[in-house]
Amino acid sequence: MRPVAIFDSGIGGLTVMAEVQRRMPHLPLIFYADQDHVPYGNKTPERIRAYMIEVLEDLKPYNIQALLLACNTATSAAADFLRAQTDFPIVGMEPAVKPAVLKEAVDKKILVSATDLTLRLDKLTRLIKNLAAEDRVQRLSLQELVAFAEKGDFDSPAVEQYLRDQLQPYDLSTVGALVLGCTHFLYFKPLLEAILPPAIDIIDGNAGTVKQLQKLIVYHEDGQGAEPRPQFIVSGRPASKEEDFFQACLRRS
């Protein structure tokens, strides 16, 4: 089987990679983290598209059968652009607003958390408008969680205080769901569960994205030997120094 590449600006995409491994354990995987340029949430769409051209060049020798953009910001800024450059499927992420809208009672608000750029771009606005959910959705920037995650800080007092400060302006008694619109944010789900009222559902788009990937690729169970070991790349170079950290993050996912 040809490999599938999973891309993120940093370690957030490892939460999606863990879901891929659970569903397709014999699929050869390449994880590409553009940590030289993380975070993407404070970059321009033009800059992100330039980075993604470099990523495609770096991945050419691997003869991948698909690229999964395990990054909501990169999807919003560059997915359509990349599809015009490639002859293999580009699978993107988007905040799981639709599942939240369909699940929650109509009198409940939905908090959509994401990076600054994802919250600003038209892609999210169109998604909300198409669901006729403008009056129900509130946007919540949790940009700094990306930096905390990249340092391996998932539950310190500083992280907890940051989350409490960001949530403080919202009336949580009116909220039915919090959508995690950045794959980095999934590492903080246990802390969010401790902070938020128990009635608030925490929803992410990882499972739906991986199901979409399954429809588009060639996969078969090997049935022989050990599961393939993933390859890790950081901004075009082998992730020799970073692999232990990446493996630890996979175990948390």
Image (cartoon, rainbow, N blue to C red):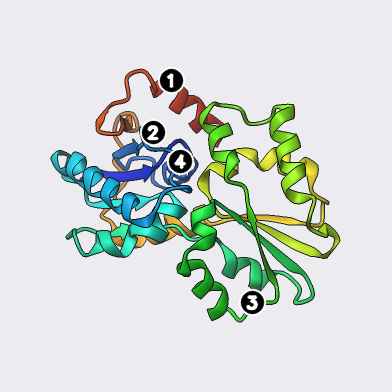
Mark number, residue 227: none
Which residue is depicted at the point 70% across and 65% down? Answer: 110
Which residue is depicted at the point 53% across and 71% down? Answer: 125
Name the N-terminal-most of marks 2 and 3. Answer: 2
**Marks 1 and 2, how far apart in space?**
15 Å
| Residue on which disc 3 sits | 133
Name the front one of labels 1 and 2.
2
Which residue is depicted at the point 76% across and 63% down? Answer: 176
**As rendered, which of 30 and 172 lies closer to the eye?**
172
Quadrant in the picture for the C terminus: top right
Give the percent coordinates (x, y) of residue 27. 32, 43
For the residues labelled 3 and 4, say whether their Cβ atoms are less than 8 Å apart: no
Name the N-terminal-most of marks 1 and 4. Answer: 4
**As rendered, which of 49 and 88 lies closer to the eye?**
49
Secondary structure of the residue carrying tag 4 is loop
Quadrant in the picture for the N terminus: top left
Name the N-terminal-most of marks 1 and 2. Answer: 2
| Residue on which disc 1 sits | 244
| Residue on which disc 2 sits | 35
| Residue 112 horizontal side relative to residue 24, left or right | right
Q: What residue type is labelled 1?
A: Asp
Q: Is residue 100 depicted above or below 107 in this figure?
A: above
Mark number, residue 39: 4
